[in-house]
């Protein structure tokens, strides 16, 4: 029989060992428990969303630079490239982001800041307060600028900019020059890259020695999914610049040389503490489908943009586009078929005409689309509008998916061949419409220019294409300064980003001078002054410099120690180089 | 260049390569035999051809649905994960290292490989295996291609991933589109820029190479050539800034899986197994409680 040892001894040994292990583990488990129960502060982490380089190389570069600088400052930063339509969806509709980098079309008047920042719009879709920013002082100032005029309003606006440097819901990086290219046929007549509908109207109305041409103007554009949605009131889509604005006319066009009455023949302003206007439409105007356009369409457009469900939901489903302008208007009444009466919420003659730049929609097409199809969603907002019926000087002829969009002149337009129309379209049309040729990327657009397939470019070109264009004989590079800007926006609902001090610090982590020189290749003006930091280019009201643009580093790169001392001065703590929550 | 011109040029160059390679590797004699016996040969691999056709048609016809599923419903963006993982594992992403040695000649070589070399690599074995006396190899190849496309499609639905050039234009250069912007017209027709994980360029090329190795007694010289081309294609995808190293790794794994499927299964077998399984199931449903 083998000696297996006494059972009691074995048991004792085992239990002894168990106690020993348990004892030695006790300290360790306590530590584990306490860590599991109250995990100490973690590293601040932020995800930056922007379109990939294919869609906009500058945005991708800014996002990438920002990611590196955030990381140097101790933040766990991630860059998530995301297609344009999806970015708009996440940022403008869902509020599903921490930080975004995007190109904004620009602020045409100070009042545009109201749509961008007023807390009333925090729950609305579109460029209406996409930052979920809510600040009582800012709200008051934004309301006050509506009802004041002249010097009083200037005072209010200066105060607003001062206040924004404290609260920093977003900041501007730089104002890019819009870059385009033109072929030999038009190099004499075109001086800047077209981007507004009025630019195209000018090109098509400019007589040349060889014209008029019996072919359409060929415009090269690039981008993903440009033809999938032709709906003028949605934001979550990628669109050919100016295309929809060429199809849908406004009451009045705004140009650098003043206003041009368009669907409107005349605007009479009334007196009173808040403005009123009587708009008379041109006689006998038609929609592209032959229906007549009248004042009821104008009134409908405003009703519809305010609530696309037309009263079917309690709180309304506002359109994500044109809400800023539309909300200037208290009400619009169609007095007769050619007259509409506007009552404004503003006392300001500079601001009120913004409401006339909204494209007018045909009631007979859009009224049936007011059906509610989901949570805060109406048919109008999900409809692709494949066959847009507008009233513009162009109508849509054909769309070849991701290849071509053809516009032809709308000969029933009241300004087509008109005797007494605006001088800008006296010689319209010198071309038989416009064809937008869609290329996969900017390089392919320049190829089209080289092969004389297109007359000029419509999408802004990245700076590195300018070298190639200038090497081609007969083609030239076009640049113009627009109001557009690149911005970095913060989601105030994010745990850390809700703190204005944190947003102030983040805003300093980008070297704007360096960005303009290197990321934009010099084709941009950095945001330096107070006004420009919030999107108003060359504002006289807020032209002083601000501390927000002093960069803690050099040559675009953040200095870790400098950044750290900035954050520590605001009572943030670091551990192993990581910024803690 | 328009799309038609790009395609025409591609067709011309690749056809020239195919004809040359066929004369060298297959020989005129075997080729004539193969053309004479085309009927039974086609019949013998009708099923795998149909399977490949179905998967390709599915890919083509469900583009919009897949895009919406991928981006809006599943929305699993792994781009940054790929980048961060490579940096953590290797210190630096291999794409940066590869691009740091770039020269004009190297760029031209890799652009050629990425577009023409790749097309040739995929098409030549179809011709070569078609000229054999049995259609077993060709069936295996076609089924492996089908598996590649099928599994690839599934991955593309599950993951949104942009390539290096799209992720960080400061770190990575978009060499392909700088050298040959119209190539995007071509690749756009077959793929979206969010479909980079795994690299189908790599997986299909490696599939051809692995099968070349398995059939080395038939075409011994094809092994080194396909190996050189396949590795070049894999490197070119990274050098040109289109794919991450991890895409290439995943592509190689996908190639192994696809070859395994191609060698061990037949379309006929899969179909009849499926049929038997269904019949059993239906049977069970038809007679409840009969077990």
Image (tube, coloured by chain):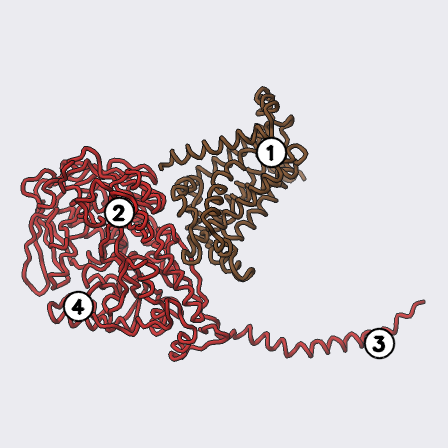
Q: Nearer the viewer, residue A529 or A247?
A: A529
- Residue hosting label 4: A540
Quarter assignment of residue A567? bottom left
C-beta proximity under 8 Å, tags 1 and 3: no
Q: According to the colouring, which chain is brown?
A: B
Q: Position of residue A129 (x, y in %)?
A: 29, 62
Q: In this view, does A122 lie above or below A374?
A: below
Q: Position of residue A544 (x, y in %)?
A: 22, 72
- Residue hosting label 3: A9
Q: Nearer the viewer, mark 2 or mark 4?
A: 2
Q: Is residue B199 above or below residue B48?
A: below
Labels 1 and 2 share a subunit: no
Quick check: B79 left or right of A373? right
- Residue hosting label 2: A181
Q: Where is residue A454 in the image (x, y as percent from the top left)?
A: 27, 40
Q: Residue furthest top?
A: B36
Q: Mark 4 lies on which chain?
A: A
Labels 1 and 3 share a subunit: no
Colour chain A is painted in? red
């Amino acid at each position: 029989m083998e000696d297996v040892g006494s059972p009691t001894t074995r048991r004792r040994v085992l239990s002894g060992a168990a106690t020993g292990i348990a004892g030695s583990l006790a300290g360790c488990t306590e530590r584990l428990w306490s860590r599991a129960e109250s995990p100490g502060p973690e590293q601040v982490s932020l995800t930056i969303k922007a379109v990939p380089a294919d869609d906009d190389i500058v945005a991708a570069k800014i996002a990438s630079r920002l990611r590196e600088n955030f990381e140097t400052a101790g933040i766990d930063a991630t860059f998530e490239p995301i297609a344009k339509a999806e970015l708009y969806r996440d940022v403008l509709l869902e509020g599903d982001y921490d930080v975004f980098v995007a190109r904004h079309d620009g602020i045409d008047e100070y009042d545009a800041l109201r749509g961008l920042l007023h807390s009333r719009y925090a729950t609305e879709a579109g460029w209406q307060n996409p930052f979920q920013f809510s600040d009582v002082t800012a709200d008051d100032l934004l309301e006050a600028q509506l009802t004041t005029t002249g010097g009083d309003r200037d005072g209010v606006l200066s105060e607003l900019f001062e206040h924004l440097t404290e609260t920093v819901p977003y900041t501007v990086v730089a104002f890019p020059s819009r870059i385009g290219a033109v072929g030999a046929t038009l190099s004499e007549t075109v001086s800047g890259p077209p981007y507004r509908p009025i630019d195209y109207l000018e090109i098509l109305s400019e007589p040349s020695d060889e014209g008029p041409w019996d072919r359409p103007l060929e415009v090269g554009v690039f981008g993903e999914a440009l033809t999938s949605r032709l709906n003028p009131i949605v934001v979550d889509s990628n669109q050919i610049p100016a295309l929809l604005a060429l199809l849908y006319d406004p009451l009045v066009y705004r140009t650098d040389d003043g206003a041009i009455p368009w669907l409107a023949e005349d605007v009479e302003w009334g007196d009173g503490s808040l403005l009123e206007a009587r708009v008379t439409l041109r006689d006998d105007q038609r929609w592209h489908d032959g229906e007549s356009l009248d004042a009821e369409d104008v009134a409908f457009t405003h009703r519809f943009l305010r609530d696309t469900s037309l009263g079917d939901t309690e709180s309304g489903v506002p359109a994500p586009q044109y809400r800023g302008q539309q909300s200037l208007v208290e009400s619009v009444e169609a007095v007769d078929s050619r007259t509409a009466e506007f009552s404004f919420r503003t006392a300001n003659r500079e601001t009120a005409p913004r409401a006339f730049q909204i494209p007018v929609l045909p009631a007979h097409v859009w009224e049936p689309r007011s059906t509610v199809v989901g949570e805060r969603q109406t048919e109008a907002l999900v409809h692709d509008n494949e066959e847009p019926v507008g009233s513009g000087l162009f109508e849509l002829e054909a769309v070849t998916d991701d290849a071509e969009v053809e516009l032809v002149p709308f000969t029933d337009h009241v300004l087509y061949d008109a005797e007494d129309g605006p001088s800008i379209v006296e010689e319209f049309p010198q071309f038989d419409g416009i064809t937008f040729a869609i290329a996969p990327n900017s390089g392919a657009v320049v190829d089209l220019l080289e092969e004389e397939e297109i007359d000029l470019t419509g999408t802004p070109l990245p700076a590195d294409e300018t070298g190639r264009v200038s090497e081609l004989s007969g083609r030239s590079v076009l640049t113009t300064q627009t109001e557009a800007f690149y911005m970095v926006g913060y989601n105030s609902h994010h745990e850390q980003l809700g703190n204005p001090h944190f947003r102030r610090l983040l805003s300093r982590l980008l070297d704007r001078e360096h960005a303009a020189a290197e990321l934009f290749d010099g084709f941009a003006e950095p945001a330096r002054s107070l006004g420009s930091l919030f999107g108003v280019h060359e504002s006289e009201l807020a032209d002083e410099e601000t501390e927000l643009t002093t960069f803690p580093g050099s040559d675009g790169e953040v200095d870790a120690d400098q950044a750290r001392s900035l954050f520590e001065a605001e009572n943030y703590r670091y551990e192993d180089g990581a910024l803690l929550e | 260049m328009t799309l038609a011109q790009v395609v025409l040029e591609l067709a011309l160059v690749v056809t020239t390569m195919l004809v040359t390679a066929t004369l060298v590797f297959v020989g005129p004699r075997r080729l004539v035999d193969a053309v004479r016996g085309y009927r039974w040969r086609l019949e013998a691999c009708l099923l795998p051809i149909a399977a490949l056709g179905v998967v390709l048609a599915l890919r083509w016809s469900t583009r919009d649905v897949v895009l919406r599923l991928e981006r809006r419903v599943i929305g699993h963006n792994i781009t940054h994960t790929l980048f961060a993982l490579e940096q953590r594992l290797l210190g630096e992403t291999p794409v940066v290292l590869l691009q740091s040695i770039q020269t004009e000649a190297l760029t031209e070589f890799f652009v050629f490989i990425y577009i023409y070399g790749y097309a040739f690599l995929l098409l030549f074995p179809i011709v070569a295996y078609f000229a054999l006396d049995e259609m077993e190899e060709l069936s295996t190849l076609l089924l492996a291609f089908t598996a590649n496309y099928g599994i690839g499609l599934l991955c593309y639905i599950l993951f949104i991933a942009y390539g290096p050039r799209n992720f960080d234009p400061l770190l990575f250069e978009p060499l392909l589109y700088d050298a040959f912007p119209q190539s995007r017209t071509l690749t756009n027709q077959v793929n979206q820029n969010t479909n980079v994980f795994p690299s189908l360029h790599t997986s299909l090329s490696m599939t051809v190479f692995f099968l070349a190795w398995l059939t080395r007694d038939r075409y011994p010289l094809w092994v080194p050539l396909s190996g050189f081309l396949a590795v070049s294609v894999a490197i070119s995808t990274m050098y040109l800034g289109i794919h991450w190293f991890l895409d290439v790794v995943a592509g190689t794994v996908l190639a192994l899986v696809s070859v395994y499927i191609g060698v061990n299964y037949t379309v006929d077998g899969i179909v009849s197994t499926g049929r038997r399984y269904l019949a059993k199931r239906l049977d069970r449903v038809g007679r409840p409680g009969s077990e």
